[in-house]
Amino acid sequence: MTDIKLIHTEKAPAAVGPYSQATAANGMLFVSGQLGLIPGEGKLAEGFEAQTRQALENMKTILEAAGSSLEKVLSVDVFVLDMGKFADLNAIYAEYFSDHKPARAAIEVAGLPLGGLVELKCMALTE
């Protein structure tokens, strides 16, 4: 039986539903979708660029709480309301993933929780 560890850190926004910030098992980490929510405030950062940076910061914080890092990310899924912001997304994303470039999907969606403009989730190694 595999032990599944639930990850939670106060340094990132709490889950907005019945799920964990991340789960880990067998050296793998699965980080739940991160909006541009400001930790401790419960509100979204202002605008697409600020939400994108905040979502990446939230993801980074959860990775670190689990003993992982951006350098151990294998795959990222990005959900955006407006694919017209793709160039802005790429510019900010490259600040976090410059040398290490994990696999990625970017998907335009009709809506995101709490009225978010962007959401990111990832899979990473913990070992």
Image (cartoon, helix red, strand yellow):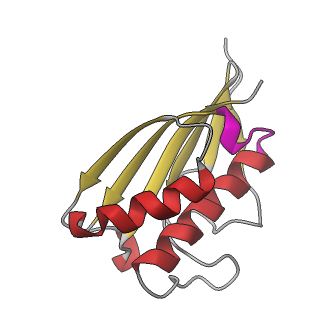
Q: In this view, does 121 lie to the left or right of 78?
A: right
**Residue 118 image position (x, y, % from top left):** 39, 66
Identify the residue at image location x=63%, y=66%.
14
**Residue 52 image position (x, y, % from top left):** 48, 68
Q: In this view, does 1 lie to the left or right of 17?
A: right
The quadrant of the picture occupied by the N terminus is: top right
**Residue 95 image position (x, y, % from top left):** 59, 58
Q: Does residue 71 belong to the magenta stretch?
A: yes
Q: Farthest residue toward the top?
A: 1
Is residue 103 in view from this perspective?
yes
Judge whether 24 appears above or below 6 on screen. Answer: above
Identify the residue at image location x=77%, y=66%.
10
Q: Is residue 16 left or right of residue 67?
A: left
User: Which range of residues does the magenta coloring cover?
Assistant: 66-72
Q: Looking at this view, is 13 or 98 the one in front?
A: 98
Q: Does residue 14 belong to the magenta stretch?
A: no
State the image quarter where residue 71 is shown. Answer: top right
Judge whether 94 appears above or below 77 on screen. Answer: below
State the image quarter where residue 73 is shown. Answer: top right
Is residue 17 in view from this perspective?
no
Identify the residue at image location x=58%, y=47%.
97
State the image quarter where residue 61 is shown. Answer: bottom right
Q: Farthest residue toward the left?
A: 110
The quadrant of the picture occupied by the C terminus is: top right
Q: In this view, does 53 lie to the left or right of 62?
A: left
Judge whether 108 appears above or below 97 on screen. Answer: below
